Image (cartoon, rainbow, N blue to C red):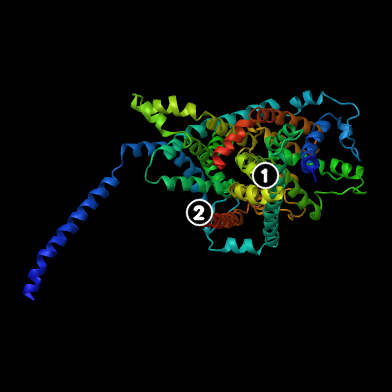
């Protein structure tokens, strides 16, 4: 077997692996777009048609009246932004301390935080639900944001500590010798240097909060406070599931996140690698 | 005797003096170590908010769940009286318990094994240069960016027996000749959901594997090639052994993640038909929030907690042995 045929076999093998997986991944999204353009009469036809006979783009306008889509968008943003801000605000100092200061109980703290990574929210959801009811916090923004922030501590601290420890300590110390206070050294030197790690954390937390389902399903029952996930989930609770509307809403919700992912793919991967692979 | 004592006494007193010195030294060291330095004060202040939120939102409820599991609870989850192990006995006597336990094992290990194998092969393929590589990597992000919930809803529609595109596709390809009600029958619904679980887990695993592969220095491959090593030899002797740490992390994360996965089953079948496609997580939710049987639900929470704890101890041991 000479080199050229070997290369060809190589290429062939690659395509045999990649193409089927890609097709299976694309398939549902393709059907999503096609279904979202169908008329209601064309949804419930057996066997179903592939391409809508006459694509109805008006579906994308109708859904804004059919469900409170704008409200759901606003709520999702509130939950996700609130969670991200709170999480970073408390994870950043904790990560700084564990990465830079040798203090007693450091390992215990890290262990405690890491243990929470093992629990799914489901193990605590019943007691947490009762606790929120006790403090009259069901159906509030704060119940969601605080809970999300708690469940994101492990991941954020882990990622940020990993990132901080890749930055040489000397740089801050030099700044402190030059008369910077510790706080100034952190904000003028460390934080700018750790920006990629912080950005990665922000993105992961934001997306986690944007897509979360279980906690919000349990704590929020009034549709005024529903995020997009529950708004979409609400479709299948109705007598008749209007799949064309559902698909249109899904499309609108997914697109911003997909675009965001494509824009930040590099940061996403480097953020992951900083934490997981070193 | 007396002389013996006298002879010995200077030595003894020296010994005592020595010990006293040591003890007082240690004492001051201890006092010093108990004193919190300024550095440490800053550290404790820094971790305090994080510690507070994690303890109050996660650890306190875990503790309360443990206590609840041993009490009789009413429909609102209020304690009525001590129950001992009654909740656990009721749980283990449920007709479906074994079924759901087996489902959970099936779901977790079946899905993780298949996902890891597919992702590893895919990552090895994507690590080469070929036409469409960038496009493939972009496509890979799709199921990750879309929430689990949306993926689950999409597939619920696709698997619809009368109007779903899966039947249409398989008929067009000539693979089946009658329509199948995928999610309505136990035989097909559970495998269908595992299939969906695999599709949504592939992106994260593949991308992490890919990052691991790219961390292997190219010089290593080149050196092997110069030495005349075969491709398969390079794969099994160089690539896979070096990928081991990443493999370990991905597998562990995936097992925890899959075990705890809620939305796919809840949205696609909600455990039906007849509660036969539950895993423990979804069954727990149904027991608590639909049937309002908080006693059994708390007992199940404890059971799940203990399983996860066992798994993490096993994992820590494995990791420790690896460290030796």
Q: Is residue B290 visible?
A: no
Residue highlighted by disc 2: B323
Secondary structure at numbered mark 2: helix
Q: Name the subunit of mark 1.
A: B
Tag shown at residue B246:
none
Mark 2 to mark 1: distance in Å?
Answer: 31 Å
Q: Residues within 10 Å of mark 1 (few under 14, many from 20)?
A: few
Secondary structure at numbered mark 1: helix
- Where residue A163 appears, as percent x and y from the top left, is 50, 36
The lab-note entry on whether marks 2 and 1 share a chain reads: yes
- Which of marks 1 and 2 precedes in the sequence? 1
Residue highlighted by disc 1: B225
Task: Give B218 or A146, whichever is nearer the viewer.
Answer: B218
Q: Name the subunit of mark 2.
A: B
Query: In the rendered image of this protein, does residue A255 appear above or below residue B189?
Result: above
Residue A195 horizontal side relative to residue B111, left or right:
left
Task: Give B122 or B80, whichever is nearer the viewer.
Answer: B122
Q: Residue at x 87, y 29 (%)?
A: A39
**Closer to viewer: mark 2 or mark 1:** 1
Task: Give B121 or A186, whichever is nearer the viewer.
Answer: B121
């Amino acid at each position: 077997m000479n080199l050229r045929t070997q290369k060809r076999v190589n290429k062939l093998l690659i395509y045999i692996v990649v193409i089927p997986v890609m097709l299976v991944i694309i398939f549902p999204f393709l059907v999503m777009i096609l279904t979202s353009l169908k008329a209601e009469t064309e949804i419930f036809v057996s066997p179903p048609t592939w391409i809508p006979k006459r694509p109805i783009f008006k579906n994308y306008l109708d859904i804004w009246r059919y469900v409170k889509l704008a409200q759901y968008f606003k709520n999702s943003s509130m939950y996700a932004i609130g969670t991200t801000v709170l999480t970073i605000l408390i994870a950043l100092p904790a990560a700084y301390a564990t990465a830079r200061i040798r203090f007693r109980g450091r390992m215990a703290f890290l262990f405690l935080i890491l243990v929470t990574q093992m629990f799914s929210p489901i193990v605590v959801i019943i007691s947490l639900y009762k606790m929120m009811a006790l403090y009259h916090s069901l159906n509030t923004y704060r119940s969601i944001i605080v809970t999300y922030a708690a469940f994101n501590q492990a991941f954020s601290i882990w990622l940020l500590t990993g990132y901080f420890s890749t930055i040489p300590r000397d740089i801050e110390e030099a700044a402190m010798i030059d008369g910077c206070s510790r706080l100034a050294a952190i904000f003028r030197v460390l934080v700018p240097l750790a920006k990629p790690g912080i950005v990665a954390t922000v993105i992961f937390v934001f997306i986690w909060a944007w897509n979360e389902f279980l906690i919000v399903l349990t704590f929020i029952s009034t549709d005024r406070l529903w995020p997009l996930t529950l708004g979409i989930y609400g479709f299948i609770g109705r007598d008749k599931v209007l799949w064309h509307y559902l698909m249109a809403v899904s499309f609108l919700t997914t697109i911003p996140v997909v675009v965001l992912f494509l824009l930040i793919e590099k940061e996403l991967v480097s953020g992951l690698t900083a934490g997981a692979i070193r | 005797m007396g002389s013996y004592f006298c002879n010995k006494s200077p030595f003894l007193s020296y010994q005592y003096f020595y010990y006293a010195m040591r003890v007082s030294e240690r004492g001051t060291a201890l006092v010093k170590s108990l004193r919190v330095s300024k550095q440490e004060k800053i550290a404790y202040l820094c971790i305090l908010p994080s510690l507070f939120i994690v303890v109050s939102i996660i650890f306190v409820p875990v503790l309360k769940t443990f206590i609840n599991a041993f009490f009789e609870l009413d429909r609102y989850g209020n304690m009525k009286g001590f129950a001992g192990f009654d909740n656990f006995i009721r749980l283990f006597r449920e007709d479906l318990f074994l079924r759901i336990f087996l489902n959970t094992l099936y779901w977790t290990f079946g899905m993780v094994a298949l996902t890891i194998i597919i992702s590893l092969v895919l990552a090895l393929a994507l690590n080469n240069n070929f036409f469409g590589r960038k496009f493939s990597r972009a496509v890979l992000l799709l199921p990750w960016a879309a929430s689990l919930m949306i993926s689950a809803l999409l597939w619920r529609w696709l698997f619809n027996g009368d109007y779903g595109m899966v039947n249409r596709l398989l008929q067009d390809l000539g693979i089946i000749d009658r329509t199948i009600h995928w999610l309505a029958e136990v035989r097909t619904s559970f495998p269908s959901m595992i299939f969906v679980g695999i599709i949504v887990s592939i992106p994260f695993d593949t991308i992490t594997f890919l990052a691991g592969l790219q961390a292997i220095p190219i010089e290593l491959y080149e050196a092997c090639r110069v030495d005349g090593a075969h491709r398969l030899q390079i794969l099994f002797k160089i690539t896979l052994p070096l990928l081991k740490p990443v493999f370990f992390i991905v597998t562990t994360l995936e097992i925890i993640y899959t075990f705890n996965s809620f939305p796919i089953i809840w949205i696609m079948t909600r455990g039906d038909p007849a509660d036969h496609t539950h895993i423990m997580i979804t069954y727990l939710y149904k027991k608590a929030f639909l049937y309002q049987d908080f006693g059994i639900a708390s007992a199940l929470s404890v059971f799940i907690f203990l399983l996860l704890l066992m798994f993490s101890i096993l994992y820590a041991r494995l990791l420790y042995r690896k460290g030796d």
